[in-house]
Amino acid sequence: MGLPGMLQRLNLMQVEHEVHVYYPEAGQTYLDALVSGSKYTQRIEFNYHPLKEGTVEETDTYKIEAYDLLHSTPALGYRLTEKSKMRFRKDLLAKYGLGGPVLGELERQGEIEHRGKILTREELSYLTDERIFAYIFDTGICDNINQLMEHADAVLMEATYLETEAELAEEFMHMTAEKAAVYAKENKVKKLILSHFSERYKDINLYQKAVEKTYKNTHISHDLDVIEI
């Protein structure tokens, strides 16, 4: 319900950049109703991207994938992968006395001649690890959660209920904190970040107690948290 206000505020500000909106294709009727629910004069360009399950975008440096989730309305989870990068080894650069413009030449050409020796980009470099972030909100238990979370560095996930309300979670297609922790453990997630808590729980520390035995590296999120991975 916050979408119309966001779009109209950007319109009122007359932002100079194009505004992109990504959403499940199956939810098109909801989007149409929200953006036309009140009268306003459109002064900026909106670019709408209805998505299906699959690759949303891919470049040489990153990949964004969408997976269907299980909910009462169409919902997608997202997996963002920052691909491995080739980085120069500082110890080898120091060993050969390399620096400055010559490194740019090495990147462009792949090799250089230095002091009578051919040096390649590969032999002076190492590959960084992939970095993976998953965003999983509004879902009940489904197989695609495993696809989203597998070996992720960080997962931001809903935990509307505790296991004491497991029946409600199943009925309304939401997740319990305990089940989120099990998913994180089974998929070897490095850090689990929980949010989307039901207001029925007045003590948010109950969430921490619920997951600590299953998956210790869990952060119970608060507004404006800064989380280091």
Image: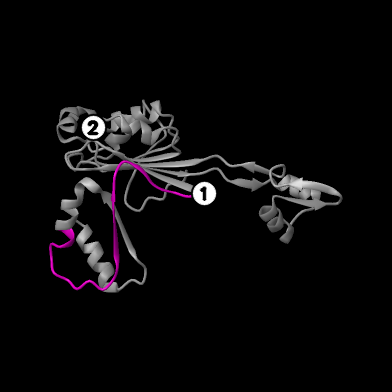
CA–CA distance in space, label 2 to label 1 = 41 Å
Q: Which numbered tag is attached to residue 164?
A: none
For residue 40: magenta?
Answer: yes
List the residue tagged with mark 1.
60
Q: Which numbered tag is attached to residue 162?
A: 2
Residue type for callout 1 = Asp
For residue 11: magenta?
Answer: no
| Residue in view at x 19 percent, y 32 percent | 169
Residue 195 in sight in this render? no
| Residue in view at x 80 percent, y 49 percent | 96
Q: Nearer the viewer, residue 104 or 130?
A: 104
Magenta residues span 34-61
| Residue in view at x 86 percent, y 51 percent | 115
| Above or below for 42 versus 65 | below
| Above or below for 29 versus 216 | below
Q: Nearer the viewer, residue 65 or 3?
A: 65
Q: Label 2: how many residues lie within 10 Å, few (<14), some (14-19) or many (20+)?
A: many
Residue type for callout 2 = Leu
Counting residues from the start of the chain, the first of labels 2 and 1 encountered is 1
Q: Position of residue 181 (x, y in %)?
A: 34, 30
Quarter of the figure that contains the N terminus: bottom left
Element carrying mark 2: loop
Q: Position of residue 84 (x, y in %)?
A: 55, 43
Looking at the image, the residue that sits furthest to the right is 116
Q: Label 1: how many residues lie within 10 Å, few (<14), some (14-19) or many (20+)?
A: few
